Image (cartoon, coloured by chain):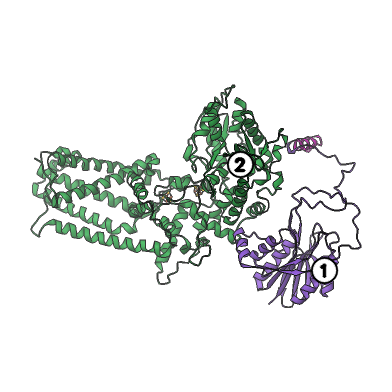
Chain colours: A green, B purple
């Protein structure tokens, strides 16, 4: 029966080789832990305290999901397979080594079939590793995507891993060549290489000597890798899982944290390194530099100064500067002075959440950006357009600087008038939102929506001048005080109303109502796409005129990524008889229109290609698409403009979901 | 320390449609909301800039009106040191002369180096508050100033004249200046800062003396401008008006 032999071919005359192996690895491990401790200590030392120890079972679950199964890594095919191949093969090698240790010291079980299977698995994963390494080499040295970091430490890591694996399989095949065990074929790759060794005609003695040398090399490379792990690009093997373990669990993605208060009870507006929380600093140290966030960021794509990867690495950079001059002990370094974290960078973010949806190790970019924005707002470092919008919002409750009494001007043409929900009970309270209420170009869409509601006999009303801007984007701009004020006004207006369900046409409003408003009681809140889908399912909304358009649909960030509403609008589109063709970037991959996070109020800056234009170009590439369907009032203006500026007026037209419904009725 | 006093007034907010009261000689105030007078806002900004530049104590005085506290706290959040609400103002607007008299008594005690006021306000009929004040305080006055700097016992002020001519003038302090615009546009101040001020600052109230409401100027009629004969008014909503404008421009061969 085949059986695992401890330290085959390793001379025993200086005592058991395990003493050597264990002392080398123990030493390496101790150095690793010490160096890692030196690094990790800083997170807590520099950063603001924040508790992330609750819900341990979910944290454990996330650890398995994101750092072992690596579901996020697998979102992208090529890099996903590449990384999985490298990581999983090492998981298996690690497990294999651990099992061997158990077998040799505690419980002998690696014999017979189990042993053969054990060998087969290790051998197969060597092949898996080789595939991963080839993919990695091809990617890093041939295709060279822009998003990667090209620094020697990445090459070093790849070399070290490859040396470990190659020396491992060589040791193995040399053993097979000499020993020629009956289960040799269970290590197909090793067996194959063994044949090559046999072919050279080298003597058993020579092969055994080689075996010893390469085995030693294998051991020392492994030890070296462990020792250098905390200073190389493999550090993410440790920090990644730590970052994942401590990721945010108490808030949904659509909820921002309130302004934190410091020990002195004063609000903390983050502008210094040591005003970040330890977790925000850990983000910087954990970043794998994979560049996924950079790749998907609409601001970066548009040529704006923001690169989310650099932003996170900027934090690491500043921490490293701190370490470089530990005597000075200066942790109060101004973040904004680092060009990767400048105020222009902060103002470029549309808060589209693409980065945080993509990041394999759950870095939380947006929280950091918003906290720094809060500082910028307090210091008045905002551009004049944003200043006007905020002044108007404070003064009139809308960014248009119009009288609150004009909010419901679009209702004038309705007879009987649309119910005032602040005066009479309604079943559905429609939170109309600023753009749909005040933008003259959108009045038509708003009245169409109301007309459809009337036609299906929906008992609905609006709050007229009682409604204020919901504040979603005010909060994302970093004007927390104004946000709170708007919330208070809206809650007191809502408190005067009798209703069962809140509906809204605006995904931004939807997000803050669902995730952030401190309602005294649980609420039912629906986006109009969800309401329409419900009405269709209940048979209350029936279409007699099926449309035969070929259309595509744009997922609004605050409806899709933030709140997972992907299917309702698609169901409505299909129910109107349209054929829906998806853009390559659909659902949680959807590209932001560029208006979110208060960007719609700011100066555009030096933009190369607007995200909305890139989106329209993406849509017209689809075959025979007539209409670009949107379900957010801001999207109508954003994309109608983009269709004009890209010169695609003849190819595609922008339609709101409600227009399809009206046409199909 | 330099003492700067700014007089800030609230005026009807023009985002609301203006309506004439049944009397036909005044605005219907029942619907009107008020807002800080834009020129006074610039005067405040200029005062804060001076304070930031070389140190000063800034006092803001505002005649009472609905929302005046919020306005005053906002100025505190910007950097004003002392907030004063002038009470005892009745329904009817006092004349500038009597307001100036009350203010002058108050301001004299403060021994200011500089008194700033917006050069005009759109609800001010006679437009002479600042000059009257200068007269009563026996200080020099210049109006339509855009930008001030302080230099020892003198102020340097900039004034734009028609035709793009810029004048730089030197004024002996103390002085009263009518501000048209500050060097930098008025800053934004975060609401949380204003709210913080509400808890940490207080507004002093000073009772005004008897105020005159009748001056030698009498409003006989207040009305919305009527379309002149030659003007054609385009009726309709935004879209219709836009279409009409386009077709007119086309007719004129401009498009
Ligand atoms: S939220 Fe969107 S815009 Fe902001 S950094 Fe992330 S990907 Fe870029
Ligand atoms: S932040 Fe996340 S997605 Fe971006 S480069 Fe780092 S690890 Fe990759």
Report helix, strand or loop for mark 2: loop
Q: Is residue A284 left or right of residue A191?
A: right
Q: Quadrant of residue A82?
A: top left
Mark drawn on residue A498? 2
Image quadrant holding the C terminus of chain A, namely: top right
Residue B64 image position (x, y, % from top left): 75, 63
What chain does badge 2 belong to? A
Chief secondary structure of the magenta portion: helix
Q: Is residue A620 above or below residue A437?
A: above
Magenta segment boundaries in residue numbering: B240-255
Report helix, strand or loop for mark 1: helix
Q: Is residue A341 left or right of residue B24?
A: left
Residue B58 image position (x, y, % from top left): 69, 70
Image quadrant holding the N terminus of chain A, namely: top left
Towards the viewer: A113 or A309: A113
Q: Is residue A323 above or below residue A392?
A: below
Q: Is residue B36 magenta?
A: no
Q: Quadrant of residue B158?
A: bottom right
Q: Is residue B252 magenta?
A: yes
Note whether residue A28 is visible.
yes
Residue B208 image position (x, y, % from top left): 79, 69
Q: Is residue A528 left or right of residue A183?
A: right
Q: Which residue is mark 1?
A: B100
């Amino acid at each position: 029966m085949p059986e695992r032999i401890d330290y085959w071919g390793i001379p025993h005359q200086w005592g058991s080789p395990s003493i050597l192996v264990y002392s080398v690895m123990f030493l390496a491990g101790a150095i690793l832990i010490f160096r890692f401790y030196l690094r990790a200590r800083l997170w807590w030392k520099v950063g603001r305290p924040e508790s992330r120890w609750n819900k341990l079972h979910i944290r454990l679950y996330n650890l398995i999901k994101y750092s072992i199964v690596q579901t996020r890594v697998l979102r992208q095919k090529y890099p996903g397979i590449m990384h999985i191949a490298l990581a999983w093969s090492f998981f298996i090698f690690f497990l294999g080594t651990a099992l061997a240790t158990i077998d040799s010291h505690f419980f002998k079980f690696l014999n017979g079939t189990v042993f053969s299977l054990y060998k087969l698995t290790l051998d197969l994963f060597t092949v898996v590793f080789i595939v991963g390494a080839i993919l990695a080499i091809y990617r890093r040295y041939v295709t060279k995507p822009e998003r990667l970091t090209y620094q020697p430490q990445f090459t070093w890591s790849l070399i070290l891993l490859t040396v470990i694996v190659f020396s491992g399989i060589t040791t193995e095949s040399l053993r097979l060549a000499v020993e020629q065990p009956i289960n040799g074929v269970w290590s197909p790759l090793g067996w194959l290489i063994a044949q090559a060794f046999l072919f050279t005609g080298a003597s058993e003695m020579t092969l055994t000597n080689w075996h010893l040398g390469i085995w030693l090399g294998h051991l020392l490379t492994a030890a070296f890798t462990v020792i250098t792990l905390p200073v190389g690009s493999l550090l993410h093997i440790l920090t990644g899982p730590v970052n994942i373990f401590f990721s945010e669990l108490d808030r949904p993605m659509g909820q921002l944290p309130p302004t934190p208060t410091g020990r002195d009870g004063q609000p903390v507006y983050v502008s210094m390194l040591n005003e970040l929380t330890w977790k925000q600093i850990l983000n910087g140290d954990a970043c794998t530099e994979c560049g996924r966030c950079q790749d998907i960021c609409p601001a970066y794509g548009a040529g704006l100064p923001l690169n989310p990867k650099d932003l996170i690495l900027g934090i690491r950079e500043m921490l490293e500067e701190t370490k470089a001059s530990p005597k000075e002990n200066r942790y109060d370094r101004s973040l904004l002075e680092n060009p990767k974290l400048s105020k222009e960078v902060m103002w470029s973010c549309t808060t589209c959440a693409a980065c945080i949806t993509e990041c394999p190790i759950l870095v939380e970019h947006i929280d950091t950006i918003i906290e720094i924005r809060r500082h910028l707002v307090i210091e008045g470092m905002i551009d004049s357009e944003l200043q006007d919008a905020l002044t108007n919002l404070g003064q009139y409750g809308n960014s248009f600087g119009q009288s609150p009494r004009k909010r419901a001007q679009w209702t004038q043409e309705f007879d009987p008038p649309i119910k005032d929900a602040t005066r009479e009970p309604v079943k559905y309270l429609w939170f109309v939102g600023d753009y749909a209420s005040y933008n003259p170009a959108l009045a038509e869409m708003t009245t169409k929506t109301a007309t459809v509601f009337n036609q299906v006999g929906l008992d609905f009303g609006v709050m007229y001048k009682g409604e204020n801007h919901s504040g979603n984007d005010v909060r994302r701009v970093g004007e927390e005080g104004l946000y709170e004020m708007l919330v208070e006004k809206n809650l007191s207006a809502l408190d005067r109303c009798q209703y069962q369900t809140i509906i809204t046409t605006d995904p931004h409003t939807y997000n803050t109502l669902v995730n952030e408003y401190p309602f005294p009681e649980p609420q039912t809140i629906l986006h109009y796409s969800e309401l329409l889908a419900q009405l269709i399912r209940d048979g209350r909304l029936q279409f007699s005129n099926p449309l035969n358009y070929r259309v595509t649909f744009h997922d609004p960030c605050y409806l899709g990524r933030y709140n997972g509403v992907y299917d309702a609008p698609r169901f409505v589109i299909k129910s109107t008889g349209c054929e829906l063709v998806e853009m390559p970037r659909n659902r949680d991959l959807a590209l932001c229109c560029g208006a979110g996070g208060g960007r719609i109020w700011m100066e555009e800056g030096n933009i190369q290609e607007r995200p909305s234009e890139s989106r329209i170009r993406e849509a017209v590439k689809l075959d025979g698409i007539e209409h670009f369907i949107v379900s957010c009032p801001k999207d109508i203006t954003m994309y109608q403009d983009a269709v004009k500026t890209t010169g695609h007026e003849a190819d595609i037209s922008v339609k709101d979901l409600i227009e399809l419904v009206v046409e199909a009725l | 320390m330099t003492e700067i006093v700014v007089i800030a007034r609230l005026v009807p907010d023009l985002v609301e449609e203006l309506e004439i009261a049944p009397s036909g000689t005044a605005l219907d105030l029942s619907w009107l909301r008020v807002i800080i007078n834009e020129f006074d806002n610039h005067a405040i900004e200029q005062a804060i800039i001076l304070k930031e530049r070389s140190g000063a104590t800034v006092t803001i005085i505002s005649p009472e009106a609905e929302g005046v506290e919020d306005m005053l706290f906002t100025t505190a959040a910007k950097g004003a040191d002392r907030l004063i609400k002038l009470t005892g103002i009745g329904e009817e607007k006092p004349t500038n002369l009597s307001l100036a008299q009350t203010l002058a008594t108050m301001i004299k005690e403060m021994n200011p180096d500089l008194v700033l006021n917006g050069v005009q306000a759109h609800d001010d009929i006679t437009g002479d508050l600042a000059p009257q004040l200068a007269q009563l305080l026996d200080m020099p006055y210049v109006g339509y100033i855009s930008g001030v700097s302080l230099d020892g016992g003198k102020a340097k002020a900039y004034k734009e004249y028609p035709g793009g001519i810029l004048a730089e003038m030197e004024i002996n302090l103390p002085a009263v200046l009518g501000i048209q615009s500050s060097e930098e546009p008025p800053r934004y101040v975060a609401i949380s800062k204003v709210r913080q001020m509400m808890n940490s600052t207080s507004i002093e109230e000073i009772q005004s003396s008897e105020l005159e409401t009748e001056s030698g100027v009498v409003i006989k009629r207040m009305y919305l401008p009527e379309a002149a004969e030659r003007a054609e008014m385009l009726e309709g909503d935004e879209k219709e008006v836009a279409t009409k404008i386009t077709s007119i421009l086309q007719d004129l061969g401009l498009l």
